[in-house]
Image: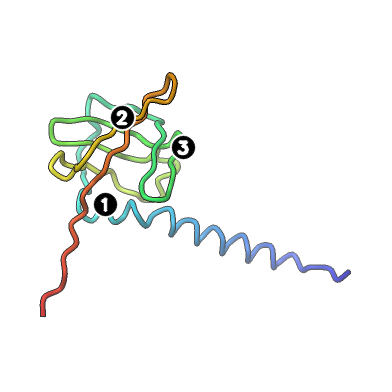
Amino acid sequence: MPHTPQWIYIVFLTFSTIVMIFLFRHDWNRLAKLYRTKEAPPQNFFRMQSGSVGLVHYKGTLNVGITAEGIYLSIFPLFSFGLTPLLIPWSAIRKIERLNLLTNFLFSVFVCILVRQKSN
């Protein structure tokens, strides 16, 4: 059986990490184009929550706040990789569903993302 060179493992690990970072950032960056904020977290702020943005699940790394303007989202700084905080206005939220799973209360929030088409 031939021996696999160690550099192949390093290349594979590096490539996999880069791909995961791009996938991790894709949907968040789409929201950030519209809803990026530089505001400080609100008083009503819950750290280390779990939730999904697109296909990425943020288990215990999502920070969520509720304000009069909308829903504030950020990622725990150690895992943010430069992802900016979001403030999604209530006007962009199309639906909030409450899901009751035994004793846990989960909410699904559906956000409208406006897509602009280029005019000729």
The image shows residue 103, relative to residue 64, as above or below, that is above
The type of residue carrying mark 3 is Lys
Left or right, 98 with respect to 116, comes to right
From the viewer's side, name the closer residue of 60 and 14.
60
Left or right, 7 with respect to 30, comes to right
Q: Which percent across, then down, holds residue 42? A: 22, 29
From the viewer's side, name the closer residue of 4 and 57.
57
State how many labels appear.
3
The image shows residue 92, relative to residue 7, as above or below, that is above
Mark closest to the chain's N terminus, 3 or 1: 1
Farthest bottom residue in view: 120
Are the residues flagged by discs 3 and 2 in contact, CB closer than 8 Å? Answer: no
Q: Which percent across, then down, holds residue 101? A: 42, 25
* Residue corresponding to mark 3: 59
Crowding near the residue tagged with mark 3, few <14, some 14–19, many ≥20 C-alpha atoms within 10 Å: few
Mark closest to the chain's N terminus, 1 or 2: 1
* Residue corresponding to mark 2: 98
Marks 3 and 2, how far apart at CA: 19 Å
* Residue corresponding to mark 1: 31
Image point (19%, 43%), residue name: 94
Looking at the rendering, in which quadrant would you find the N terminus? Answer: bottom right
Looking at the rendering, in which quadrant would you find the C terminus? Answer: bottom left
Image point (41%, 23%), residue name: 104
Mark 3 element type: strand
Crowding near the residue tagged with mark 1, few <14, some 14–19, many ≥20 C-alpha atoms within 10 Å: many
The type of residue carrying mark 2 is Arg
The type of residue carrying mark 1 is Leu
